[in-house]
Amino acid sequence: MKAAVLREANKPLEIEEVQVSKPGPREVLVRPVAAGVCHSDLHFLDGSYPYPMPTILGHESAGIVEQVGRDVTYVKKGDHVITCLSAFCGHCNKCLTGHLSLCASPEVSRAASEQSRLSIQGETVHQFLNLSSFAELMLIHEHALVKVREDMPMDRAALIGCSTTTGVGAVFHTAAVEPGSKVAVIGCGGVGLAAINGAAIAGAGQIIAVDMVDSKLELAKAVGATHTINASSGNAVGEVIEMTQGGCDYTFEAIGLKATAEQAFQMLCSGGTATVIGMIPVGTMVELHGVDFLAEKKIQGSNMGSNRFRVDMPRFVDFYLAGKLHLDEMISKHIKLADINLALEALKTGQEARHVIMFDQ
Amino acid sequence: MALVTIESEITGNVWKIEAAAGTATEEEDVILILESMKMEIPVESPEKGIIKEILVSEGDQIQEGQDLAILDTGD
Ligand SMILES: [Zn+2]
Ligand SMILES: [Zn+2]
């Protein structure tokens, strides 16, 4: 099969012929139909999150089951599925206490001593986040996918695989936003827009979108923002405090920068909670004003929206089909796998919504 | 002889050890691969040298700041 291979940080991906191993007892071979190009792929491309190479990026996809391993009963050939990087073992302390997205069990990937799932003429290709979706086939653990309704369009379904789950999940699960509350979201990329949409579904009273790009602020309004702030003016914190008459109950950072994580904390009212969704580069420290803890301000991380994706994703599909979850607006372009580098470049400029790869079927 | 201790930047577990004691490394050569929050994270040699000791084994759970390996940089 063909795949977009990353061999060195900051170099273009190369389309190469890659060999896929046979499904192990609990593995599923999926033929992706659509794969989103997500902002977090960039963190690995530019090396701010180191990853062993060669690897195949991509972690947001929907497809059709091609083949299942001996012990797989959950899906069969032909089922429509969304993949998720939050593969869970189902029996560790995190899984058993309902925190499936924090499962760290190594059993969902192959051990270093086993044949790797992906290879190029005998050379190991490191599977990215147990998925690697910029490829014509994906060999994944059965706990890294969920079955979905077949009337769900695949390109929209792909987005649910990461950005929707990350943004909406941060609002529903990590922060548990209360109806009527005041919310600010910093960063209106795919994840930030999903958080705004999630806050609207959760019934937030005031939803302030903060970004530096006007077109993204327009999108934010289309998915549920009640107010917008163009942060180029340089005083987003002051404007949020003024708009909310004292700060937000919940803020969400969806960029991954020290400065905006700190701003998310500064935008809170007393008792408020800041949730950092963005991936802050390894080694970066975040500074908070200690006295703010006396006002019971809180800050927390959110990884993949604290999801229980086998429960969440079919609900998100229903939300989309009911017109509550806005995914059509999130896709700016459909591309071919061969155009992946252009999509990654476009993402870097921050001007556009998402590009989605459509695979030839 | 200058010894450099290589620490982990994250909490996770050791997925694969790529270089044994005695291996000569160049700067940025991968010494071992950690696994944390579904990510594989390579730990690279900070400079040219010889691995004096690997302090962890495959499958070990490790904490942020924990010593992973000792590199002899010779000078
Ligand atoms: Zn993503
Ligand atoms: Zn588990």
Image (cartoon, coloured by chain):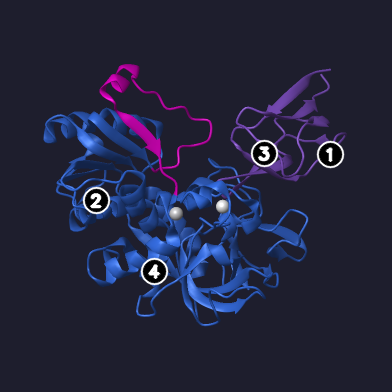
Chain colours: A blue, B purple
Q: Quadrant of residue A296?
A: top left
Q: Which mark, residue A199?
A: 2
The residues tagged by marks 4 and 2 sit, at their Cα atoms, a distance apart of 20 Å
Q: Are marks 3 and 4 on the same chain?
A: no
Under mark 3, the amino acid is Gln
Q: Secondary structure at mark 4?
A: helix
Q: Secondary structure at mark 3?
A: strand
Under mark 1, the amino acid is Ala
Query: In front here: A248 or A202?
Result: A202
The residues tagged by marks 3 and 4 sit, at their Cα atoms, a distance apart of 35 Å
In the rendering, at what x and y percent does residue B56 appear?
Answer: 75, 35
Tell me the residue that label 4 is attached to.
A157
Under mark 4, the amino acid is Ala
Range of residues picked out in magenta: A277-303
- Report the chain holding disc 4: A
Q: Please say if the residues under marks 3 and 4 sit with CB atoms less than 8 Å apart.
A: no
Left or right of A170, for residue A101: right
How crowded is the residue under tag 1: few (<14 C-alpha within 10 Å), some, or many (20+)? some
Tell me the residue that label 1 is attached to.
B20
In the rendering, at what x and y percent does residue A98 appear?
Answer: 46, 51
Which of labels 3 and 4 is toward the front? 3
Q: Is residue A259 magenta?
A: no
Under mark 2, the amino acid is Ala
Tell me the residue that label 3 is attached to.
B61
Which of labels 1 and 3 is toward the front? 3
Residue at 61 percent across and 51 percent down: it is: A105
Question: Taken as a whole, is the magenta stretch helix, strand or loop?
Answer: loop
Of the image marks 4 and 2, the number of the one nearer the N terminus: 4
